[in-house]
Amino acid sequence: MNKFLTNLGMSTEKWQISDVYGLDPDVLAIVPRPVLALIMLFPCSDKYEEYKNVQEEEITKKGQTVPSNLYFVKQYVHNACGTIALIHSVANNLDRIKLGDGHLKQFLDDSIAKTPEERGDLLQNSLGIINTHKELAQEGQTAAPQPTDPVAYHFVAFVHKDGNLFELDGRKSFPINHGSTTPDTLLEDAVKIVKQYIERDPDTLQFTLVSLAAADS
């Protein structure tokens, strides 16, 4: 992920992706601070799909507060959830992260005034980002997924915006407001939501967390 961001034009000297090795307070305490975003990889199971539908229906009925400056992009590109999670993490922290010239800065400049749906359409045609993703996927130790392969796992990002914790999942219809948080408590508050994901799908332990946080000196 750090190489991907670097290739897209973001310096990882100050901010970088770091592993989060557990959910216990003593383990979270060693995560470099400040944390700008938490990214979760989890099984894309039937239970996830069922809860996603129920959650969206409830929010549609009750409503929620979503600030206009929260950057959200719909996912239309197959197997691009990791890329979108990184975009969500960076785009909602541009007050802290300074992007150099590159494909990511160009995409965000071009899409900042668009709707989430228009951003998703634009990403489909952003060959610089798509090709960078493909090149790095081919460097992995396992075979890169084909465009038509079924999705077994999914990435989502958690960010702070205007005093609230937001879950950003490009496969959902809108961001999910999980209530109050602060820049200092983002990690711990996001982990509470992660634990709810695990409780809803207790038969699997295949959850992975990484943070976009200060570079560990």
Image (spheres, rainbow, N blue to C red):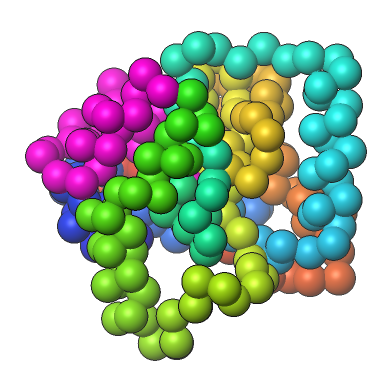
* Residue 209 % position (x, y): 55, 57
User: In the rendered view, does 148 fall on the left or right side of 96?
Assistant: right
Q: Is residue 148 magenta?
A: no
| Of residues 197 and 60, the one drawn nearer to the viewer in this rendering | 60
- The magenta stretch is 85-114
Instruction: Note whether 115 is above or below 151 in the view shown.
Output: above
Residue at image position (40%, 28%) is 92
Q: Position of residue 8 (x, y in %)?
A: 21, 51
Image position of 31 with respect to 41: above or below: above
Of 50 and 27, nearer the camera is 50
The quadrant of the rendering that contains the N terminus is: bottom left
Q: Is residue 206 left or right of residue 5?
A: right
Which quarter of the picture shows residue 95? top left
* Closest to the observer, 113 or 141: 113
Tell me: residue 63, above or below residue 85: above
Q: Please tell me whether residue 99 belongs to the stretch shown in magenta.
A: yes
Residue at (48% x, 24% y) in the render = 115
Q: From the viewer's perspective, is 128 left or right of 194?
A: left
Residue drawn at x 10%, y 39% is 101
| Residue 34 visible in the displayed image | no
The answer to whether residue 160 of the structure is visible from this angle is yes
- The image position of residue 36, as x and y in percent, is 41, 35
Q: How many marks can you see?
A: 0
Up/down of 142 relative to 33, above or below: below
| Percent position of residue 164, x then y | 60, 19
* Residue depicted at x 65% and y 52%: 24
Q: Quadrant of residue 122?
A: top left
Q: Residue furthest left?
A: 101
Residue 114, by quadrant, is top left
